[in-house]
Image (spheres, helix red, strand yellow):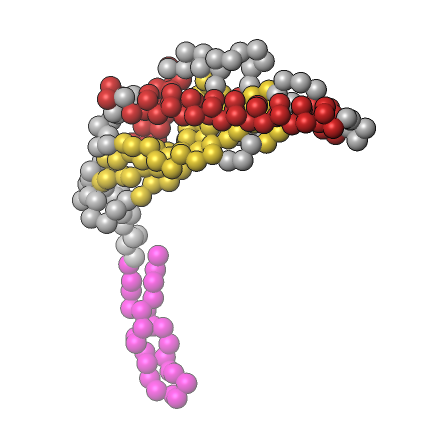
Amino acid sequence: MPMNFIQVINDAVALLQANENGQYRALGYQVLSDTPDEAFIEGDDTFLGTVRIFHKASDFPAKSGSRNGPVNNEVKIALEFKTAAKAKGDMTVLSDESALPADVITALAAVQNAELIANGKMDNLFSTVYNIIMDLRNKKLGSSINIGSRWISQYAKDDPVRFGAIVALTAGATITALVPEQLSGAPTPAQPTEKTYDTDTVSTYDDTGADVTNAGVKVTN
């Protein structure tokens, strides 16, 4: 029987997807590209980016339950965010050795401005997801399973990465949810096949010449 944490994570993905409202795109566990394509829509300043949500780890504290449950499962759910912003201006001058210093300065300023915009979008993306997850109406993460509690920790950003005129930014956070697991107990162990024996003669004499007739047994099945 599948454990409850699997259903909880699937329901959490569905919860975030149901609340996208064009602001972000929620994804389950899947491999994303290294480019900012998923996190940027040209001309759409309201789109904040993408968030992946998937199982990261489970911890079962000592004495967390009995043989037949429930057992407390401290589930770690990863949140991975990606956003991007586009620098306004001619970025080709940054790789043009013949570019004028004034043009390079202008391009660098545009990149720095894009980094600031991406940083602000990331904070807005995290804030949006945080408020959905921590809303009292969503204390079960959209699931029918009675989650003990849940909280979000470890929000941290990575360094921005430039792809031409686009600056991409990623970040991560962790949802911790206390999920009860109702165990069904171990299956009935298989019983060994019963064997029958007879007392046929195994040997008549041993190496010393002693009579050992009927001293052994012979397995007949």
Quadrant of the drawing holding the C terminus: bottom left
Using the image, determine if residue 206 lies above or below residue 57: below
Residue depicted at x 29% and y 25%: 134
Quadrant of the drawing holding the N terminus: top left
Using the image, determine if residue 209 lies above or below residue 51: below
- Where is residue 194 drawn, in percent x and y? 28, 54
- Where is residue 204 drawn, in percent x and y? 36, 79
Residue depicted at x 28% and y 44%: 60
Q: Main secondary structure of the magenta part?
A: loop
- Residue 9: in magenta span: no
Query: From where the camera sits, is residue 184 visible?
Result: no
Residue depicted at x 43% and y 25%: 123
Question: How many numbered circles are shown?
Answer: 0
- Where is residue 96 drawn, in percent x and y? 78, 28
Question: Along the horizontal axis of the image, is 144 left or right of 111?
Answer: left
Quarter of the image where one finds residue 115: top right
Q: Determine the residue located farthest toward the bottom in the rendered image.
A: 208
Query: From where the camera sits, is residue 150 visible?
Result: yes
Q: Determine the residue located farthest toward the right in the rendered image.
A: 98
Numbered range of the magenta stretch: 196-221
